[in-house]
Amino acid sequence: MTDPSIVLAADVPFPPKVEDFYLPSILPWDAHNSYWFTKLTALVWISVAVLIIYFLVSYRKPKLVPTKKQWLAESIYGFVRNNISIEMIGPRGVRFAPYLATLFCFVLLMNLWSIVPVAQISPNSHIAFPAILAVISYVMFIYVGSRHHGGFFKYLKFALVPPAPWFILPLLIPIEFFSTFLVRPFSLAVRLFANMFAGHMLLLVFTLGGFAMINANAWFTPFSIVSWILTIALTFLEFLVICLQAYVFTVLTASYVQGALADEH
Amino acid sequence: MLAEVAGSTAAIGYGLAAIGPGIGVGLVFSAYIQSTARQPESSRLTLPYVWIGFAVIEALALLGIAFGFIWQG
């Protein structure tokens, strides 16, 4: 046990806990139980700044034959506009393309922090951020539905009362209410949160597990190395999950809006 | 002979909870592959529904993770 790397890793806590997600405060430095400005806060602000600056810069002087930057920004927007808004909502979906594109980019960038070196944690692994995004989607589809059907109560009637025989309605109305107004925002928030939470946990288990094994017995070193190689493989899996969850969040928001805008069941 | 086993039974519970969503996600993609094999030009049409179905089923498995941590105390 003279190897310096082993001595360095001597006090690695294993298994990882929920407390590992509460990072120490940056401002004031290293204060305990102070969560006003942590790494997560910094990452959220950086994401917002990167998105605003990137899209402003790449679209400052739009050209007919786009430059590389403009092409990338346009293809991101075009992807959301054509493949999500128009495909899910129909021709009326173009109106929602700006919000959906913003949502997609924001969720994607926030998720991406979980595999960027140094950052290594996504703000979305705390439920507060997905919850707010889900509330925005929730308010939006109810508002859009109320506008489209001419009043909140008319929309409520449209959403809750399906065309069915009267005797089945006492069963259907609670189910519809439960699924549309309670489960939708909850599942939207929890899905994104739990994906990022589980992804971070998984990477922690494999990284710290490698250290734990090497600490337990020097003969376990090969297993530790396998564990660290798996961490790299899981990082690629995490990248897949990141893109998929950003897409799913946007598609589900679009599908809820589409449901609110539909003219018949 | 008795061996001491330390740890949380939540791990076993989550393993059991993941069976159902696992089967469900498998069914979603098997249906998509079948429908695409039978009607290749419908692949783009059905893809958004694949992701919605996948997301709804996956939410069950993820609820398992989240509630495992909530109720562990």
Image: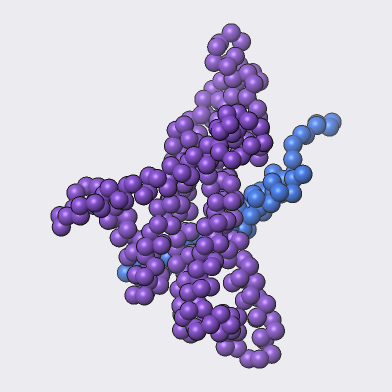
Chain colours: A purple, B blue
Q: Residue furthest bottom?
A: A166
In front: A254, or A195?
A254
- Which of the 4 quarters of the picture holds residue A77? bottom left
Q: Residue at x 67, y 36 (%)?
A: A33
Quarter of the picture holding the N terminus of chain A = top right
| Relative side of B5 to A252, left or right | right
- Is A246 placed above or below A85 here? above
Residue B48 visible? The answer is: yes
How far from the left and from the top, in percent, is residue A255? Answer: 47, 69
Q: Residue at x 51, y 64 (%)?
A: A137
Q: Residue furthest top?
A: A2
- Is A159 placed above or below A54 here? below
Q: Residue furthest right?
A: B1
- Is A239 placed above or below A224 here? below
Q: Residue at x 52, y 57 (%)?
A: A133
How far from the left and from the top, in percent, is residue A249? Answer: 48, 59
In front: B3, or A85?
A85
How far from the left and from the top, in percent, is residue A232? Answer: 46, 34
| Relative side of A127 to A170, left or right | left
Q: How many marks?
A: 0
- Is A196 placed above or below A96 here? above
Q: Residue furthest front?
A: A28
Residue B31 visible? The answer is: no
How far from the left and from the top, in percent, is residue A254? Answer: 45, 67
Q: Residue at x 46, y 44 (%)?
A: A45
| Relative side of B9 to A73, left or right | right
